[in-house]
Amino acid sequence: MKAIIFGINGQDGYYLSKLLNDNGIDFIGVSRSDGNWERGDVSDFVFVENLIKRELPDYIFHFAANSTANHSAVFENHKNISDGSLNILESVFRHSKKTKIFLSGSALQFQNNGSPINEKTPFDWNSLYAVERIYSTFLARYYRKLGISVYIGYLFNHDSPLRTERHINKKITTFVKRAKDGSHDKLVIGDMNVKKEFNYAGDIVNAIWLLVNQNNFFEAVIGSGKSYSIREWIEYCFSKEGLNYVDFIEKNTNYVSEYSVLVSDSSLIMSLGWSPSVDFYQLADMMMES
């Protein structure tokens, strides 16, 4: 058995590579950056086609993307998400129809009124990032009609010690450790009342693996279904170090959140027997101790 992971150098690629190793599956990791993997760009059709034609993999996982919905990443996200998905799908259609493909979807591509989101929730093109994810979903549905096994996991917020400080959870845990060491800086935060899921990337990857190894359904929302506020994360992380967060927080009055609550209804993936193994507090401990 063989797999290709596009976006090997992100947290999802890392945890998936560990899972594949544990299952005795050979894999090729692909990234645009230097490292112990194959260097290449998923938006380059010639590269993608040649790789798939050469390897004829059993699985392909597409994680390559800039993990931001910010408009400034519009062209990068278009290349990675939309062009990348099309390149993979067309290459598999031409050369390796046995290959199972996983494409990452996002919680942000759905209409969100604060209620739990599931596979039947309508899409919402509220950002260009959402547009790219929606486009790749319809690409998958088209190629599925041509006989290609294409799976989509609509991933809700998930983190790990591998996150960078671009991401709010990691920004907070890193700041708390600096504060414990005597820093008098302020942590600038937007809306602390925003509620979202705090999932562990390793758990999300386990759900992805479960999804692609069954044939009853091909699209699934993946998340814990449990939401917590940013304030709760801040309070817990500061309290672990014996600090009062109020002494360190500065509010960003110009910040406007994309949502007030973002939570999943993951009953479909859970019907296969998946459930998260790491909860909110364990994830905070893990990221604080890394």
Image (cartoon, helix red, strand yellow):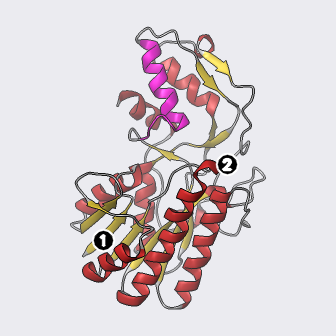
Q: What residue is pinned by disc 1? A: 3
Q: Work out whether residue 14 or residue 135 is closer to the camera in this orientation and state it.
A: 135
Q: Residue at x 56, y 63 (%)?
A: 78
Q: Work out whether residue 210 or residue 174 is closer to the camera in this orientation and state it.
A: 174
Q: Residue at x 32, y 62 (%)?
A: 30
Type of secondary structure dominating the magenta stretch: helix
Q: Is residue 173 above or below residue 269?
A: above
Label located before the other in sequence (2 or 1): 1
**Does residue 242 appear to the left or right of 75 in the view shown?**
left
Q: Work out whether residue 66 or residue 273 is closer to the camera in this orientation and state it.
A: 66
Per the rendered image, the range of residues in magenta is 163-180
Q: Which quadrant is the C terminus positioned in? A: top left
Q: Residue 176: within the magenta?
A: yes
Q: What residue is pinned by disc 2? A: 262
Residue that lies at the very extreme toward the right in this rendered image: 113
- Occupied quadrant, residue 141: bottom right
- Which kind of residue does numbered mark 2 sit on? Leu
Picture coordinates of residue 184 (x, y %)?
Answer: 51, 9
Picture coordinates of residue 177 (x, y %)?
Answer: 43, 20
- Which kind of residue does numbered mark 1 sit on? Ala
Q: Secondary structure at mark 2?
A: loop
Q: Residue 247: within the magenta?
A: no
